[in-house]
Structure formats: structure tokens, C-alpha cells
């Protein structure tokens, strides 16, 4: 077998290096994407875990509300410290601030009790200045500690002032110390600042509140016993547990997003397998003559089959190895895009400083890659090994491809569709992401099975159209297409798969954009929307003091003011949802079309919510938690549990898992949240947007970093965020399309080159070269049109599945369905151009060959 590999396989694979590269590239593409997604997923969680551990310091337990994003009363510290086994209870808060000169450069502000030297040691807050001197100067509320890395980047030294934009306004803060590269300073990639707790609370609007309490136990204390005692004496809404519990919570929260990435990469692997199948099939057809000669000189059919499978194993192993290496590089390139997307969706920063590799998972992926290569090559190897060698030598059989009965394929297609539909039903009932991914992938792959029957059924209509439009040249194309419906169907399926992937991503992005713009245009926008320039990590801006709303009402030209506060990080039934606190004007029923309220009466809902006696919930939360109008929803708040009736179910996009929309006053009273995310201004009828914007800029210049956007500018801002959120899917799609286009080109070119004897005979009986080339171009364009038609149909259904089912459970948003017609037409144009060019190039090559040589070819 090794001798056969050396004398036959390696020579032939080297001679057809382009096709060999496609086999390796097809496997490598699928493997590299899966590796990249897996490595990014693992790296994000590992980075987040390290950040939590660095922030937790040496604490044994943490006290938080939910996952630590919503503050609770500072007085809780005394209760924790009263436990006899608690050695220290350290309160902490977090917020986002930015450089005044460059708001895009943000820092995570960390507020800790710095008045005790043991706390500096506990959190490894090691500054270049003397610790005792540091404790003294940090009494100044305008003092801050920066990491050495960040200070070096900004050219700042100890004693210098740095101008920072914070929720409380723009201030000049003195740098009192530089944090060494270790401990807490290593969190957030060095983009971190530390202030004394009271000063930080004042700057970010969390007076009297903390985000977490780190608990250090006395030596010998039993952790479970202390945790049990603290849970008994603390308010029921607070969580008590080791820091690792919070990491586990976020791992569960991020699971759906990571499942979406896995689903996309699985679709890419299906495309990769099909590329390998197509390429090995055309390669096997080219090599049928060589295999027949091998059979004639004594090789058994089983030996030929083993040789071809061994080749597939070698190529699959090489492709998998290449995919592993490329996948690591791709992971590094995609990590920034993926983490930025996660930041926009979850409103939290997930920096990845280094890639983390899970070796057992990579071994599984390697096995899948090699297995996929063997599976894709099996059918071609079996077909070539089963051909009668004398027939091949006499007639060149094997080049026409495997003819499959259409009704058998239709039966298999119906089976696949039934399984796919069952998987989607299971997803709806079980709320299972895995079932949804399986069902969508199975449906998408079913195009491979149904393509041949569709081509067979359409062959009559195609023949009539081509004859009528192109005469004799059309007849020549019809003859070629009708002789091998399998070859035509396989090529059309390859085109359809590529087009389907393009339609999915394009329609998903368009549906998200239009749904979000409709929501923003009706709910979150006014004549002018005033907010901070910096964001908390995604699209949501850092909060501002509520007093700004009252002050803006005094600006000439402003008729009314409404405020919005979005509070992410609320936990409800294990889901991380958001709370939207809206002022009364937002509940005016006249703002919304009649279809906006999916459940409930708008007038009754507005009255109840304004009175603080009820809430609206988003459609996503209603579906996931099986909540409806008339039910009561109970939420954990810093002031205790809050139970209110639901009076409306409406679309909402401020959170991936759903949202509760309530009165702004309830948010202030129960969540103790005095800040606002956005201030919407309605102008007087004759007021100019530009003039009012200029007045606001003049009034607050030097005090706050504000942006005042018109409705059009707000929509453009969200468009930019959506593009950033989906940037990684575009990168994945481009990679798949490049390899798939190469594979389709090979299919078309190979099919035409196989017919060079036939084309030569046409030339012998009088057809000129131009007529032959036109017939081939007509044939390839017809295949491109069939593939495009099939791709549009399959793509429409697949996009519907992803938007209607999968996306809701994968990423969480309930979108309105929109079909990306413009993008689809562009992709169809690309497909047609590619197929026509492939047909012309192959026909040109075939017609340039000597007629005698072409007739003698075997």
C-alpha cells in the first residue's frame, strides 16, 4: 500500500496540485473556523475568570446582588463584619470613566477602602510611592492610582494631573501612585484606575451603595458554615458565595452567545465537507482511467478503495493540521471582533490578553476534521473502486459522475426535513440552543440531497427555454446538462450553499438593524438625545446626573424633557435581563402604532405604570419566562423584593435576554438609582436643532463630555454599533466564500475539461470555436442560475429559521423578519459572474487544444 501511495497517489496528487489544495483547504477551512471559535470562547471565559479572581483578591466569599452589577446598601457591611469568623469585609464598587481629551479611551474605575494598609497588601495595590505616604495623600478625594502601563501610554507621572470624564462631570484628578504590574493592576489589561471608596462613590453616582463585599475568613473557619450564617442574616436578595460562583454564572450567561458562534462554524464545516466531496468526486473522475489500469494489472477493487481512503486520511490529516494552525491565528484576529460584539450585546468589556487552549476539545475537533474528510471522500472512492475497468478503458466511463435516482433522494430529503422540523419543535419546547443548531444545520445541508431531483424535474423547462433563446448553441448546452443531472445538481448545490450562508448573515444583520431602528426611533429618540460620549462597554453610554435633565429644560428652544435609565445586570430566574426606567412621557400611547402592544391595553398600561403600580415586559422575557398580562413579576432590588403586575408585553432591544420597563420614579425609589442614561429633548416648533445643540455645548463646555444627536444621528450611531456587533460574522463569511468559490470554479472547469473529446467532435462536424465556447458559457450560466434559484429558496427558509427560532435562543433578541434583497441580488450577480468566467475559461482552454489530441484523450 505504501508503494502504491508513492508510485501512484503522490504523483497524481502532485500533478493535480490545485485540486489537492482544494481538498486540504476545504477541510482546513471548516476546522480552522471551529478551532478559532472554540479558542475565542475559552479565552474569553478564562480572561473573565482571571479578572474576577484579581478583583476578588484573597477573599473567601463575596456578597453581591445578582452577578455584582447592581449596587446595594453600604450598611450591609456592618452585618457582615459582625460575624465572628469574618476577619475582614472590604466594600468595592466599579464604574466606567474616560479620558476627557479622548473619550474612546476608557478605564474601569475601582473604588476600594484604601484607608487601611492591610487592604493595600490584600489586593496587591503596590504603588511606587511609600505606602504610608500613599495612605495620607489618598485622603484627598481628587486622588487616583493608575497602572504603570496606562500611565506610560499617556505620559503621566506621579504628581501630575489627568483630566477625566466621569458620571459626575469632568475633573482634574491628581495621580498619587502607579500600580505595579501585578495583582489588581493586571485586571482589564491595565485599563484600570483605583480611588478611595467614598471618592469613587461620589464620582460615579453610587453614594451609600457598594457593588460587592469581599469577605476574608479567620484561619480555620469553615467556609460553608459562615456562608450559611451570612445568608440567614443578610437580605434575601443578596448572594453569598465564593468568587468562582460568579464566574460560573457568567459562563452560563455567555453560553447562548457562544452557542451561536458554534452554530455558524458548524454551517461552515458543512460547506467545507461539501467542498471536499465535490473536489474528490471530480478528482476521482479524472483518475478513473488510472485506477482502471491498476485493476487490469491485478489490483483488487478492495485494494483500490483502501488506497483512495488512505489518500483521504492523509489529506484529511494534513487539512486538519493546517486548520489547527490557521485556526489559532484566526482566533487571534477574531478575538477582538468577538469580544467587541459581546461588549455591545452584554454591556460589559471582555478583554482577551492571551489565547487559552483547551487541548481535549482541540483533539475532538481534530477527530471531527479527519472524520469529515473521510466521510466526504468515501462516496467517490467507493464509486471509482466499483467501476468495471474494461468499460472505463473502452469508453472513459466514470467521467460522467454517479447517477442517482431522484425519488430515492427525495425520500431522504423528506426524512432530513422531518428531523430538522422535529429539532426546531424541540428547541421551542425545551428552550434548547443545541436542538436549534442541529435543526438549522440539517436543513441547510439538505440542499445537497434535494438539488439533483430539482434539476431533473426542471430539465424539460430548461431545455425549452435554452433552445428558444439560443438555438443550436442552447441545444448543445441542453444535451450536456441532461446527460448528467447528478453533476449539474451537485454543482448547483455547491452554489446554493454559498449563497445560503450569505443570505443568512445579510438577512440577520438587516433584520437586527431595522428592528433596532424601529425601536430606537419610537422609544429612545427625541428631537435631540443628550448622553455621555463614553460608553459602558457597548452601545449604552455611561450615566449622567439626573439634575442635567432639569437644567436642559431651561435651555432656550427646549419644550420638554424625558429621561431614560437602562440598568443592565438584573437577574431574574437565572437570566441576566435589564431594567428600563422611563419618565412618564414615554408611556404616551400616541407614540406607538396599534401593533406595538402584543398584549395589554396601551391606555390602561400607561396609567398604571406612571402611578408606579405595574410594569411592561419585553416579548423575549414574556416568552422565556412564560409571563403574560395579569401575571406578577417579582424582582430583587437593593431595597428588597418588588412584585408588580404585568400590564403590557412590547418589543424591546435593550437587553439580549429581555427587559422590564417601569416608571423612572420606581427605579429611583427601589433601586436607589439617581442617574440617567439618556435625556430626550423635544424642541419648540420653530427651534433649530443645530442652534439648540450649540447652546447645550456652550453651557456644559468643560463640565461634561456630552453628545447631542438628532434622530437621524441616533439611528446612525446604532447602525455603527450593529455593524461592529456583526463584524466577526462578515469575516467568517468571507473566508468560507473564498474557498467555496474556488471549489465551484473547480467543479465547473473539471466538468467541461472532461468533455474535451465531445467538444472536439463538435468542431469536427462544423461548429466554430466561438459557438462551442458560447454553448459552454450558456451551460455554466444555467448551472449558476439553478444554484442561485435554489440558494435563494433555501436561504430564505434558513434565514427565517435563524431569525424566527435560533436567534431568539442563541443571542436572545426577538427580531422582525426582513429579507436582504439588495445583498442577495449582489451575491447572485457575483455567483453568475463567477460561473460564467469559470465556463468561459474552461471552454477557452478546451477549444485551444488540438482537435486530434482532444479526440484521442482517454
Image (spheres, helix red, strand yellow):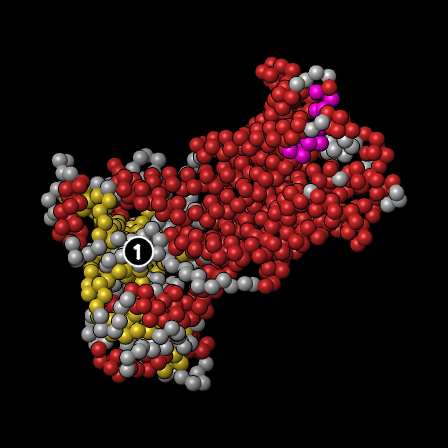
Q: Which stretch is magenta?
A: 749-763
Count of labels in the image? 1
- 1 in relation to 737, above or below: below
- The answer to which quarter of the image holds residue 158 is bottom left
Q: Is residue 488 left or right of residue 259?
A: right
Please name the residue shown 35% across and 45% down the image. Answer: 720
Please name the residue shown 64% across and 35% down the image. Answer: 747
Q: Is residue 769 left or right of residue 327?
A: right
Point out residue 16 in the picture as x, y percentages from the top left corner: 69, 42
Q: Which residue is mark 1?
A: 104
Q: Is residue 432 left or right of residue 554?
A: right
Outermost residue, right side? 298
- 309 in relation to 414, above or below: below
Is residue 42 rendered magenta in the image? no
Q: Is residue 797 visible?
A: no
Please name the residue shown 74% across and 33% down the image. Answer: 399
Quadrant holding the C terminus = top right
Point out residue 708 in the picture as x, y percentages from the top left corner: 22, 47
Q: Is residue 246 visible?
A: yes
- The answer to which quarter of the image holds residue 838 is top right
Nearer to us in this view, 823 or 116 = 823
Q: Is residue 547 left or right of residue 206?
A: left
Point out residue 289 in the picture as x, y percentages from the top left corner: 79, 37
Classify mark 1: residues with Cα within 10 Å, few (<14), some (14-19) or many (20+). few
- 113 in relation to 662, above or below: below
Please name the residue shown 57% across and 43% down the image. Answer: 739
Amino acid at each position: 500500500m505504501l508503494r502504491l501511495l508513492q508510485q501512484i497517489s503522490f504523483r497524481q496528487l502532485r500533478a493535480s496540485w490545485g485540486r489537492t489544495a482544494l481538498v486540504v483547504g476545504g477541510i482546513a477551512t471548516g476546522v480552522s473556523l471551529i478551532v478559532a471559535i472554540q479558542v475565542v470562547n475559552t479565552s474569553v471565559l478564562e480572561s473573565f475568570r482571571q479578572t474576577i479572581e484579581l478583583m476578588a483578591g484573597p477573599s473567601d466569599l463575596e456578597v453581591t446582588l445578582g452577578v455584582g452589577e447592581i449596587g446595594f446598601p453600604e450598611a450591609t457591611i456592618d452585618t457582615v463584619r459582625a460575624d465572628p469568623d469574618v476577619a475582614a469585609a472590604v466594600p468595592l464598587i466599579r464604574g466606567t470613566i474616560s479620558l476627557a481629551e479622548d473619550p474612546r479611551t476608557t478605564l474601569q474605575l475601582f473604588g476600594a477602602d484604601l484607608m487601611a494598609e492591610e487592604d493595600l497588601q490584600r489586593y496587591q495595590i503596590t504603588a511606587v510611592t511609600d505606602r504610608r505616604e500613599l495612605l495620607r495623600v489618598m485622603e484627598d478625594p481628587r486622588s487616583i492610582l493608575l497602572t504603570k502601563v496606562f500611565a506610560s501610554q499617556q505620559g503621566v507621572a506621579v504628581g501630575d494631573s489627568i483630566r477625566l470624564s466621569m458620571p459626575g462631570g469632568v475633573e482634574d484628578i491628581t495621580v498619587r501612585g502607579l500600580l505595579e504590574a501585578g495583582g489588581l493592576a493586571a485586571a482589564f489589561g491595565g485599563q484600570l484606575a483605583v480611588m478611595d471608596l467614598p471618592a469613587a462613590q461620589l464620582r460615579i453616582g453610587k453614594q451609600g451603595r457598594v457593588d460587592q463585599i469581599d469577605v476574608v475568613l479567620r484561619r480555620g473557619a469553615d467556609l460553608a458554615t459562615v456562608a450559611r450564617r451570612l445568608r440567614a442574616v443578610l437580605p434575601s436578595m443578596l448572594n453569598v458565595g465564593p468568587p468562582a460562583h460568579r464566574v460560573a454564572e457568567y459562563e452560563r450567561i455567555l453560553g447562548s452567545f457562544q452557542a451561536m458562534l458554534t452554530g455558524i462554524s458548524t454551517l461552515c464545516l458543512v460547506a467545507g465537507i461539501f467542498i471536499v466531496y465535490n473536489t474528490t468526486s471530480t478528482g476521482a473522475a479524472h483518475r478513473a482511467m488510472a485506477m482502471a489500469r491498476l485493476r487490469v494489472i491485478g489490483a483488487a477493487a478492495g485494494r483500490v478503495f483502501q488506497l483512495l481512503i488512505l489518500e483521504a486520511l492523509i489529506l484529511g490529516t494534513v487539512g486538519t493540521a493546517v486548520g489547527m494552525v490557521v485556526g489559532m491565528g484566526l482566533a487571534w484576529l477574531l478575538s477582538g471582533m468577538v469580544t467587541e460584539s459581546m461588549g455591545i450585546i452584554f454591556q460589559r468589556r471582555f478583554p482577551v490578553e492571551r489565547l487559552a487552549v483547551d487541548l481535549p476539545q482541540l483533539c475532538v475537533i481534530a477527530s471531527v476534521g479527519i472524520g469529515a474528510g473521510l466521510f466526504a471522500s468515501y462516496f467517490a472512492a467507493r464509486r471509482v473502486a466499483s467501476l468495471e475497468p474494461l468499460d472505463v478503458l473502452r469508453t472513459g466511463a466514470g467521467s460522467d459522475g454517479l447517477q442517482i435516482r431522484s425519488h430515492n433522494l427525495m425520500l431522504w430529503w423528506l426524512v432530513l426535513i422531518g428531523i430538522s422540523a422535529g429539532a426546531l419543535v424541540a428547541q421551542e419546547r425545551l428552550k434548547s440552543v443545541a436542538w436549534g443548531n442541529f435543526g438549522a444545520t440539517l436543513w441547510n445541508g439538505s440542499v445537497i440531497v434535494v438539488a439533483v431531483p430539482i434539476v431533473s424535474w426542471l430539465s424539460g423547462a430548461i431545455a425549452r427555454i435554452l433552445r428558444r433563446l439560443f438555438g443550436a448553441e442552447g441545444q448543445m448546452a441542453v444535451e450536456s446538462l441532461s446527460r448528467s443531472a447528478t453533476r449539474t445538481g451537485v454543482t448547483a448545490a455547491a452554489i446554493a450553499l454559498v449563497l445560503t450562508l450569505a443570505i443568512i448573515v445579510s438577512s440577520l444583520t438587516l433584520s437586527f438593524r431595522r428592528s433596532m431602528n424601529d425601536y430606537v426611533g419610537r422609544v429612545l429618540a427625541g428631537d435631540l438625545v443628550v448622553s455621555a460620549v463614553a460608553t459602558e462597554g457597548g452601545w449604552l453610554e455611561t450615566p449622567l446626573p439626573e439634575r442635567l435633565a432639569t437644567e436642559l429644560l431651561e435651555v432656550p428652544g427646549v419644550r420638554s424633557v424625558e429621561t431614560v435609565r437602562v440598568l443592565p445586570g438584573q437577574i431574574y430566574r437565572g437570566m441576566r435581563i435589564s431594567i428600563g426606567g422611563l419618565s412618564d412621557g414615554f408611556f404616551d400611547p400616541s407614540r406607538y402604532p396599534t401593533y406595538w402592544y402584543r398584549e395589554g391595553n396601551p391606555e390602561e398600561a400607561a396609567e398604571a405604570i406612571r402611578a408606579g403600580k405595574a410594569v411592561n415586559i419585553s416579548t423575549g422575557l414574556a416568552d422565556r419566562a412564560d409571563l403574560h398580562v395579569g401575571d406578577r413579576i417579582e424582582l430583587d432590588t437593593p431595597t428588597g423584593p418588588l412584585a408588580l403586575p404585568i400590564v403590557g408585553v412590547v418589543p424591546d432591544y435593550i437587553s439580549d435576554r429581555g427587559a422590564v420597563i417601569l416608571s423612572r420614579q420606581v427605579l429611583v425609589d427601589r433601586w436607589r438609582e439617581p442617574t440617567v442614561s439618556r435625556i430626550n429633548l423635544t424642541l419648540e416648533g420653530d427651534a433649530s436643532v443645530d442652534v439648540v445643540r450649540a447652546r447645550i455645548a456652550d453651557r456644559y463646555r468643560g463640565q461634561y463630555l456630552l453628545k447631542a444627536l438628532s434622530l437621524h444621528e441616533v439611528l446612525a450611531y446604532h447602525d455603527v454599533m450593529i455593524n461592529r456587533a456583526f463584524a466577526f460574522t462578515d469575516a467568517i463569511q468571507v473566508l468560507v466564500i473564498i474557498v467555496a468559490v474556488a471549489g465551484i470554479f473547480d467543479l465547473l472547469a473539471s466538468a467541461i475539461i472532461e468533455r474535451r473529446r465531445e467538444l472536439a467532435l463538435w468542431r469536427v462536424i462544423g461548429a466554430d470555436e466561438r459557438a462551442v465556447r458560447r454553448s459552454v458559457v450558456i451551460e455554466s450560466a444555467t448551472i449558476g442560475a439553478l444554484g442561485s434559484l435554489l440558494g435563494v429558496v433555501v436561504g430564505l427558509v434558513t434565514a427565517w429559521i435563524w431569525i424566527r427560532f435560533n436567534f431568539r435562543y442563541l443571542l436572545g433578541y426577538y427580531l422582525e423578519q426582513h429579507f436582504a434583497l439588495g445583498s442577495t441580488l449582489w451575491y447572485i450577480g457575483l455567483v453568475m459572474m463567477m460561473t460564467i468566467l469559470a465556463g468561459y475559461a474552461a471552454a477557452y482552454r478546451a477549444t485551444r487544444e488540438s482537435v486530434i489530441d482532444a479526440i484521442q484523450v482517454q
